[in-house]
Amino acid sequence: MLVYQTFNVGEAHMPIHITHNPNAADLCVFITKNRGLAQNESCWFICGTKATADKTFNFGSRGIARLSVCFVPSLGQAGWQRAHPLQGKLAR
C-alpha cells in the first residue's frame, strides 16, 4: 500500500497510533523501499507526495486512532494480529 503521512488530521483518511509493541498492535507493518512490493495492507511504501499515495494517514495519539500499528523489520512478521473491522478494507 502506498502511504503518505500528513500532520493535518483533517486531510487524513484516518488517524493511526504507532506502538513499539507488536502484541499491542492491530496490524504489524513492514516498510519497504521498493514501491512495487507495497501490494497489501501490511507492506507499506511511504510516498513523498499525497497525490501518489493510496492512503493518507496521520500518526497520532491512541485516543483518536482507529488503528494501532507496529512497524516490524521483516515482511514475515507483518500482518494483522487479530480480527479488526478494517481488515481487508484498509487498502481500498
Image: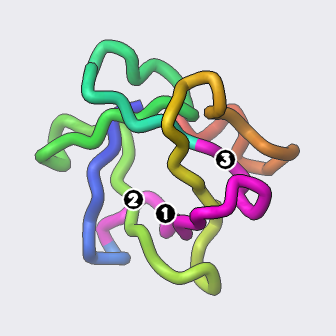
Q: Is residue 20 above or below residue 27?
A: below
Label 2 belongs to which residue? 57
**Local crowd size for mark 1, using a 10 Å CA cut-off: few (<14), some (14–19), many (≥20):** some
- The residue beneath circle 3 is 27
Number of the label disc, if any, that sits on residue 14: 1
Task: From the image, state whether disc 3 or disc 2 is nearer to you.
Answer: 3
Lower position in the chain sequence, tag 2 or tag 1: 1
**Picture coordinates of residue 6 (x, y %)?**
26, 65
Mark 3 or mark 2, earlier in chain:
3
> Which amino acid is tagged 3?
Leu
Report x, y in % for residue 26.
Answer: 73, 53
Which of the 4 image quadrants contains residue 45?
top left
Question: Which residue range is magenta in the image?
Answer: 11-28
Depth order, front residue of 30/9: 30
Please report contact status of discs 2 and 1: CB closer than 8 Å, yes or no: yes
Where 4 falls versus 29 (above or below)? below
Three-letter amino acid code at disc 1? Met
Gap in Å between the C-alphas at discs 2 and 1? 6 Å
Question: Left of 28 or right of it: where is 5?
Answer: left
